[in-house]
Structures are given as structure tokens and as C-alpha cells.
Amino acid sequence: MPDKSSRPTAAGGFLIAIGVLGGAIIGFVLGQPTIGLLIGLTLAIAASVAMWLRDRR
């Protein structure tokens, strides 16, 4: 059973979902939905990894 006194961890999956959707929408507006999706995914994964590294400390 997890220790109740420890700090709750952050949810990086939310950032990935928002990054993919936001990138696809922005890409669609600019006429390049696939590139927008990939850029949004890349930026969201980078933000999630940064959050994970910060949370590990």
C-alpha cells in the first residue's frame, strides 16, 4: 500500500493529450495537421519528461 505521507505525483499524460490535440488543431488551421500533431506530440513529451525529472527530486 502506498505511503499516505508522500507527495502526490504529477500527471504527465494530460500534457501529452493536450499537446496532441492542440497540435492537430493548430496544424489543421495552418493546413498541415500531421506536422502539427507531431510537433505537438514532441513538445508535450518533452514537457512530460521535464515534469517527471522535476518530480523525481
Image: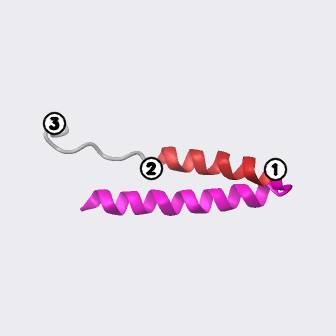
Residue 25, x across and y down, in percent? 74, 47
Residue 46, x across and y down, in percent? 51, 63
Would residue 53 appear left or right of 16 to someone viewing this image?
A: left
What residue sits 57% from the left and 45% below the top?
A: 17
Would residue 7 be counted in the magenta stretch?
no
Quarter of the image with the C terminus is bottom left
Q: Sequence order check: which comes first, mark 2 or mark 3?
A: 3
- Give how far apart the Cα atoms at labels 2 and 3 are: 21 Å
- Say the numbered circle drawn on residue 12: 2
Q: Element under label 3?
A: loop
| Magenta span dominant secondary structure | helix
What residue sits 34% from the left and 63% below the top?
A: 53
Q: Element under label 1?
A: helix
How has the structure been colored for display? secondary structure
- Say the numbered circle drawn on residue 42: none
Would residue 50 be counted in the magenta stretch?
yes
4 or 36: nearer the viewer:
36
Q: Amino acid at mark 3?
A: Lys
Magenta-drawn segment: 30-57
Q: Element under label 2?
A: loop
- Disc 2 packing (10 Å; few <14; some 14–19; many ≥20): some
The residue that disc 1 covers is 29
What residue sits 39% from the left and 57% below the top?
A: 51
- Say the numbered circle drawn on residue 4: 3
Would residue 19 appear left or right of 53 to someone viewing this image?
A: right
Q: Amino acid at mark 1?
A: Val
Q: Amino acid at mark 2?
A: Gly
Q: Sequence order check: which comes first, mark 2 or mark 1?
A: 2
- Give how far apart the Cα atoms at labels 1 and 3 are: 46 Å
- Disc 3 packing (10 Å; few <14; some 14–19; many ≥20): few
